[in-house]
Amino acid sequence: MVFLFLCDADRGSIFAQAFAEHLPEVRFSMQPDQVAPDEVRFIMTWKPPADLDRYKNLEAIFCIGAGVDQFSGAAIPDGVKLIRMVDQSITRMVTEYVIMAVLSLHRNLHVYIDQQRHRTWHEIVPQPQSADRRVSVLGLGVLGQAALHHLKGFGFQLSGWSRSARTIEGVACHSGEAGLASMLAQTDILICLLPLTKDTAGILDKDLFEKLPRGASLVQAGRGRQLDADALLAALDAGHLSGAFLDVTDPEPLPSDNRLWSHPKIVITPHIAAITQPQSAAMTTIDNLRLLRAGEDPKGLVDRAEFQVV
Ligand code: GLV
């Protein structure tokens, strides 16, 4: 029984050690040409491999990242499970990113950085206090809930939106179309942590920005295709929005002549909010393999019908 690792060798060597120590009965390999395709039961990869049909006995594909939109449309046989990475390293790093961006927007760091470039000493007062700042999260899965949990400590007014209704202590939870509109109307800092699906592609558009109060700002750590960049630039230029942190763009890397780069109210990071850390991800994967082999659902099992992206 082979677990084929098709990601970078640096992380692969850490996975290999963890497998040797904790799951020696499964043969770990990073060399597709050195294993018999029929023996491959599990593959770990970031993108669907082109030659998937070689592996007739494949049981599951493990994605090394949290997002699986890149698998949409891939010819994965029906019986093969797709499992995304639900790992504490990703959750912690996304939470750090969200806290960094929210505090930066809350305390006008993006404006002060721009002022520094122009050697301008100008205090933005009055500084709103956290208890008066309304922070909302789109997407209440593992990542959204973790971010909200840590944001609570700063005393912000918290809301969250998800497709189906949820209850989270200390968070005003909204769902559905009407819930989205009423949450947006009461949001100063909007955080997008949604997966990319046919329903969320292009969700951060003119219509959504118009529902936010004047002066609101955006943290985009979902997927690039969710954002209408022209609508964001127009909303920033009109002063309707006051700032944005973008960790994801469309395309990636963002071409050097793209206007998003030079906009003074935008901070861009190159899709680094979370980078799967191999030590903990290897243990998460091993735990999942144990669940699979016991006939149970692994953590992060993807409902593939839900993840189709158009
Ligand atoms: C990063 O965006 C991931 O999906 O892990």
Image (cartoon, rainbow, N blue to C red):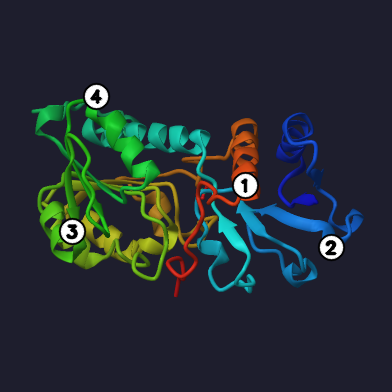
Is label 3 in contact with label 4 (beta carbons under 8 Å)? no
User: Mark 2 highlights which residue?
Assistant: 37
Q: Which amino acid type is shown beneath numbered disc 1?
A: Ala
Residue in view at x 67 percent, y 54 percent: 45
Foreground mark, 2 or 4, reads 2
Is label 4 in contact with label 1 (beta carbons under 8 Å)? no
The tag earlier along the polypeptide, 3 or 1, is 3
Looking at the rendering, which quadrant does residue 197 occupy? bottom left
Which quadrant would the C terminus be assigned to in this image? bottom left
Label 1: few (<14), some (14–19) or many (≥20) C-alpha neighbours in 10 Å: few
User: Mark 3 highlights which residue?
Assistant: 180
The tag earlier along the polypeptide, 1 or 2, is 2
Residue 242 drawn at (x, y percent): 21, 46
Residue 148 drawn at (x, y percent): 28, 36
The tag earlier along the polypeptide, 2 or 4, is 2
Q: Is mark 3 on a helix, strand or loop?
A: helix
Residue 294 tag number: 1
Label 4: few (<14), some (14–19) or many (≥20) C-alpha neighbours in 10 Å: few
Residue 236 drawn at (x, y percent): 23, 54
Instruction: Give the alpha-carbon distance from disc 3 to disc 2, as whole Å.
Output: 47 Å
User: Mark 4 highlights which residue?
Assistant: 153
Figure check: 44 above or below 207:
above
Say left or right for 58 vs 178.
right
Residue in view at x 35 percent, y 32 percent: 100
Figure check: 296 above or below 229:
above
Instruction: Give the alpha-carbon distance from disc 3 to disc 4, as whole Å.
Output: 24 Å
Label 3: few (<14), some (14–19) or many (≥20) C-alpha neighbours in 10 Å: some
Q: Which amino acid type is shown beneath numbered disc 2?
A: Pro
Instruction: Give the alpha-carbon distance from disc 2 to disc 4, as whole Å.
Output: 51 Å
Q: Is mark 1 on a helix, strand or loop?
A: loop
